[in-house]
Image (cartoon, rainbow, N blue to C red):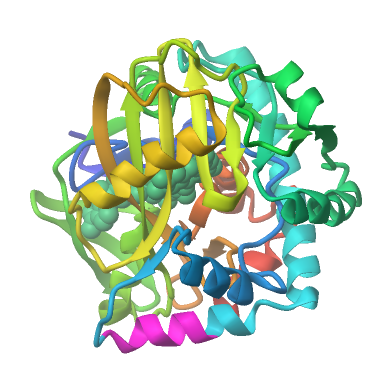
């Protein structure tokens, strides 16, 4: 292990991998550390959508009412465990306060920029590096069972048109023609051809191997504990296996990022938003295109190598308990929309923690208190999609002090 690095990246999820990649391309010596295995956090079992068209933030007008309605109908993917954690209640209140049209427009404009940037960078990445990850560029199909929601989505698509991410309306016959795995209960669909998908666990392990080949030091089972600080600079990171010194430190610890508050007096209001997925062998009637099951807020993603159902949003703190009821609801949800036999050979049951900010925008910034500490976290539901844009922006900030995209919407000072 080198005794001193140019950069230590703390947290080996998709965001840490992307930061390490672009920094190593700038000829920096980099160590990437993780408390467990690289890619064992949220980046492992997610739905794998490169959902560039997903620019609209979760906190939009009507979200709170919509969730309450779904909760009363028993179809809500959201669960909030009763808790004494004041920070979660504050987070929820701020989330509700962000559900307005001015935030929706501002956040969508900001997100559209990083999405487009990430799209171009993913294109280059997949052309340049041999990353085997079942990449397919087939778009995403939104499926609806409820006529009213289906018709109302026209407004969403018109809104997305402003950013050139609009979708195409498909009636009940057209949707089945495009995707024969859709069942009779589906009243229509909206097809968005701007999106791609990958198998995230494969991408993570291929990217890790690629980085190791470029000389990045990968250090697993290395938990970051705190920082050694002199004046306004971090001089080393204390970890469970010793000290790591470097010129620059990047914090990419996903859902765990708020933990630095105690030492650094730095507010990063990221809450863990737990989601579940079921990975299985491909069923006999398998969709060809990733399907977003609108009323259930869940995704069915097909790959050459398998099939995954994923969704739900649970605020229940830090835990990896696999709630069987929630896992089963992924299967029952899928059978509501798809000609799915529900007789699956399950390969993996999984839960992961999304790093959720209350305004549904990531944090990509230099720490206001330590000159050589940078933050890249809070990517919520779409961290895989924003990974390349984030990694490149962080690398440019570290190496050149400027970025191709405007990072002001992602400043940590907004909290
Ligand atoms: C069910 C589900 C479906 C999803 N579907 C999609 C999708 O289709 N498309 C999409 O774009 N996004 C999706 N997401 C969101 C996406 O998974 C996350 O936004 C993304 O993985 C966040 O990446 P990250 O690197 O910030 O966090 P993580 O992948 O969680 O990585 C953070 C890493 O930091 C490490 N760490 C934490 N604390 C320490 C410490 N003290 N010391 C050392 N290491 C530490 C952790 O071990 C972890 O490996 C989904 C999420 C879920 C749960």
Q: Is residue 69 magenta?
A: no
User: Residue 53 placed where, x, y %?
Assistant: 73, 43
Q: Quadrant of the C terminus?
A: bottom right
Q: Which residues are magenta?
A: 85-93
Q: Please tell me whether residue 89 belongs to the stretch shown in magenta.
A: yes
Q: In the figure, 141 relative to 67: above or below? A: above
Q: Is residue 355 above or below residue 198?
A: below
Residue 94 percent coordinates (x, y):
54, 84
Report which quarter residue 232 is drawn in: bottom left
Q: In the rendered view, tell whether residue 409 sits above or below residue 346.
A: below
Classify 74 as above or below 229: above
Residue at figure coordinates x 59%, y 32% from the top left: 291
Residue located at (24% from left, 87% from top): 84
**Residue in the picture at 75% in, 26% down:** 175
Dividing the picture into quarters, in which one does residue 228 lie?
A: bottom left
Q: Quadrant of the N terminus?
A: top left
Q: Quadrant of residue 166?
A: top right
Q: Residue at x 46, y 58 (%)?
A: 377
Q: Nearer the viewer, residue 360 or 333?
A: 333
């Amino acid at each position: 292990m080198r005794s001193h690095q140019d950069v230590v990246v703390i947290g080996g999820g998709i965001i840490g991998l992307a930061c390490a990649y672009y920094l190593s391309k700038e000829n920096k010596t980099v160590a990437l550390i993780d408390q467990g295995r690289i890619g064992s956090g949220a980046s492992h079992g997610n739905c794998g959508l490169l959902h560039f068209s997903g620019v609209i933030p979760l906190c939009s007008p009507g979200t709170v009412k919509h969730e309450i309605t779904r909760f009363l109908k028993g179809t809500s993917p959201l669960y909030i465990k009763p808790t004494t954690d004041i920070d979660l209640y504050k987070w929820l209140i701020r989330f509700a306060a962000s559900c307005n049209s001015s935030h929706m427009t501002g956040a969508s404009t900001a997100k559209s920029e990083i999405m487009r940037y990430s799209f171009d960078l993913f294109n280059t990445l997949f052309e340049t590096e041999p990353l085997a990850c079942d990449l397919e560029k087939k778009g995403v199909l939104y499926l609806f069972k409820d006529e009213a929601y289906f018709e109302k989505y026209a407004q969403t698509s018109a809104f997305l048109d402003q950013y050139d991410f609009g979708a195409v309306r498909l009636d009940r016959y057209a949707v089945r023609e495009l995707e024969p795995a859709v069942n009779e209960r589906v009243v229509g669909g909206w097809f968005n051809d701007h999106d791609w998908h990958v198998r995230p666990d494969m991408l993570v392990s291929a990217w890790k191997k690629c980085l190791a080949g470029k000389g990045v030091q990968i250090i697993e089972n290395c938990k970051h504990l705190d920082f050694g600080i002199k004046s306004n600079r971090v001089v080393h990171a204390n970890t469970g296996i010793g000290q790591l010194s470097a010129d620059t430190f990047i914090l990419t610890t996903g859902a765990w990022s708020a933990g630095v508050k105690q030492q650094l007096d730095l507010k990063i209001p990221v809450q863990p938003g737990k989601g579940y997925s079921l990975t299985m062998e491909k069923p006999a009637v398998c969709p060809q295109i990733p399907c977003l099951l609108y009323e259930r807020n869940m995704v069915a993603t097909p790959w050459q190598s398998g099939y995954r159902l994923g969704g739900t949003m649970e605020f229940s703190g830090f835990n990896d308990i696999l709630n069987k009821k929630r896992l089963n609801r992924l299967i029952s949800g899928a059978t509501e929309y798809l000609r799915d036999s529900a007789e699956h050979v399950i390969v993996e049951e999984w839960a992961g923690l999304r790093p959720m900010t209350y305004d549904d925008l990531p944090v990509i910034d230099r720490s206001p208190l330590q000159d050589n500490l940078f933050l890249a976290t809070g990517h919520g539901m779409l961290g895989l999609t924003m990974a390349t844009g984030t990694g490149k922006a962080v690398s440019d900030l570290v190496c050149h002090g400027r970025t191709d995209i405007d990072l002001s919407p992602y400043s940590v000072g907004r909290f």
